[in-house]
Amino acid sequence: MSEGGLFSTFSVCSDAAGVAGNLLAFVLFVSPIPTFNRIIRSKSTEQFSGLPYIYALLNCLICLWYGMPIVSTGIIFVATVNSVGTIFQLVYIIIFIVYADKGKKMKMLGLLLAVFFMFAIIVFVSIRVFEPPNRQLFVGYLSVFSLISMFASPLFIINLVIRTKSVEYMPFYLSLATFLMSLSFFAYGMLKQDPFISVPNGIGAILGIIQLVLYFCYSRNCAEESRSPLLESYV
């Protein structure tokens, strides 16, 4: 195969992985919709926490900035998936603020402003202080740190499943979508030779495999009766 043909094959494969990652990420972005339907119906945030959506918004903003041409070139699918993710998280946060009690409302507003302020500082520093390719390194390390910090949620669920020997709070299709999305972006990062994409998503894929294995090990123990909300609110 000629060099041009090989390059074309790599390009097609990387684009396919990027498209697949975007589609699978959309499944994850819409997964909280039932929770927010419940919040809207009850006109209360009940015992739900808004922190996961604050963390997710900051993560999407940092990764969106990393995928922009002014920082990195040739990874447009990182920008597209995180732009969609940013919109979803903002909508969720706004709904949460609208229906939260006064204490939660003020804390969430403060956290939202803190996220925007932090992101503004990152953008300012990356443009004013760093020139390419150091700009990509600076934002890339921040995106990896942000993505790895997001793995606290899968680790929490894995620990919960092992302790309770139940997969009640670990839906199979959500776990499968998480694994396939991480695998898709791991492949995308490898094909683009970008460790800032491949490394964190490789870790995510491994955690996804662990979740799926645990699901098949403990699915028979899944309780059918409903329980109280899993997460207490910290906001």
Image (cartoon, helix red, strand yellow):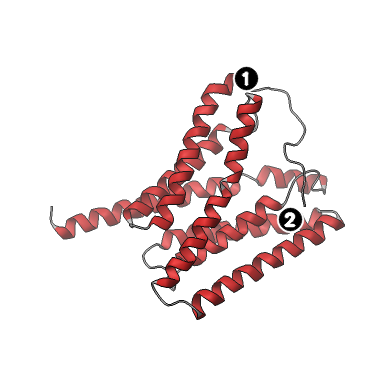
Quarter location, residue 15 = bottom left
Q: Is residue 145 above or below residue 138?
A: above
Disc 2 crowd rating (10 Å Cα; few below 14, some 14-19, many 20+) is some
Residue extending farthest top = 220
Looking at the rendered structure, which numbered label has been put on residue 221?
1
The residue furthest left is 2
Task: Return the mark for residue 113.
Answer: none
The residue drawn where x is 54% and y is 76% is: 125
Give yes or no for contact between labels 1 and 2 (Cβ–Cβ under 8 Å): no
54, 39: nearer the viewer: 54
Instruction: Give the SS element for disc 2.
Output: helix
- Name of the residue lying farthest toward the right: 102
Q: Residue at x 42, y 72 (%)?
A: 134
Please tell me whether mark 1 or mark 2 is closer to you in this view: 1
What is the x, y in percent for residue 166? 63, 25
Amino acid, disc 1: Asn
Tell me what residue is drawn at x 81 percent, y 53 percent. Answer: 100
Query: Which numbered disc flags the more N-terminal residue, 1 or 2?
Result: 2
Mark 1: few/some/many CA within 10 Å (<14, 14-19, 20+):
few
In this view, the residue in front, 81 or 206, is 206
Query: Which residue appears at 30% of the width and 51% of the height?
Result: 13
Left/right of residue 23 with respect to residue 15 in the rendered view: right
Q: Amino acid at mark 2?
A: Ile
Q: Which residue is mark 2?
A: 95
Q: Position of residue 188 (x, y in %)?
A: 37, 52
Residue 167 visible within the image:
no
Q: Secondary structure at mark 1?
A: helix
Q: Is residue 90 left or right of residue 68?
A: right
